Image (cartoon, rainbow, N blue to C red):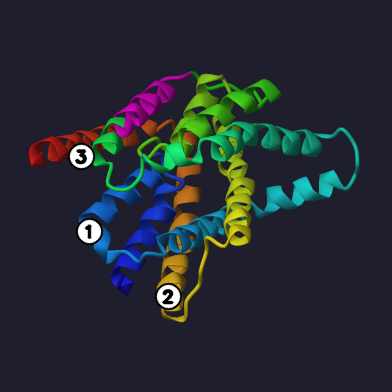
Amino acid sequence: MNYFEAIILGIIQGLTEFLPVSSSGHLELAKTLFGDDSLPNESLTFTVVLHFATALSTLVIFRAEVFQIIKGLFQFKWNEELQFSLKIIVSMIPAVFAGLFFEEQFESFFGGQVLLVGFMLIITSLLLLFADKAKNTTKKVSFFNAIVIGISQALAILPGISRSGATISSSVLLGIDRTKAARFSFLMVVPLIFGKIGKDVMSGSINFESNQIGYLLVGFIASFIAGLFACKWMIAIVKKSKLSYFSLYCFIVGVIAISVTLYNK
């Protein structure tokens, strides 16, 4: 890997973690374009660092809300902050279940599966299109909603299914207020990212080597800055019901990915 590739992959992760176009799908497409041999064998470490950067950018954008939630939790009451935190935990259950029991099966979908990415991007496109046509409401996230949104997040492990696209779309289709849907979607993934990082560190899967520090740092900075921009942009997009633009984008990229793959066979 060179510094240019580290920057590009960092920007892709930072933008696509929040924009509803699938970060995993775009990273798979980018890896294919660069060639698998150009990426380090320790790519898991690089991927974890990029996800850590986007998790931090989420906390920065929602720092006021996160502080309010923490403050509310220390009141030790059945208040809105405690309920919100419990809903976040409930939403994590499907993804944790999928990660614990089906990790090997999901991992088999990665590594140059461009055809799969293409079809999943088209599914993402349809989800965004339906969500964009949903009516605006002021409904909050319920515990039932949290588990349904959590299931959509678990399915988004598949490359090409956008996590933010799936969770925000399912939230909006459930009748949840668009701003609340975006807020819940972005905050619900933060504990999962930190949990995954902790699991990988404890298992010894992450190995830092001195010759990687420069690439990791460059990728981290690129992903963090891009994440700050994309998170704020996405909140505005959801409020204005402009998801159809990303629906069209996902459809076009999906068709191109499928066409190129079939043409090269």
Q: Is residue 49 visible?
A: yes
Q: How many marks?
A: 3
Q: Earlier in the sequence, mark 1 or mark 2?
A: 1
Taking the image as shown, residue 1 lies to the left or right of residue 89, namely left
According to the image, label 3 marks what residue? 257
According to the image, label 2 marks what residue? 212
Q: Secondary structure at mark 2?
A: helix
According to the image, label 1 marks what residue? 35
Residue 121 in magenta stretch: yes
Q: Does residue 176 sit above or below 9 in this rendering?
A: above
Q: Amino acid at mark 3?
A: Ala
Q: Secondary structure at mark 1?
A: loop
* Disc ID at residue 234: none
Image location (x, y in percent) of residue 40: 35, 66
Q: Which residues are magenta?
A: 120-134
Taking depth in this image into account, of 216 and 18 the one nearest to the observer is 216
Image location (x, y in percent) of residue 98: 55, 34
State the residue at coordinates (61%, 54%).
Answer: 199
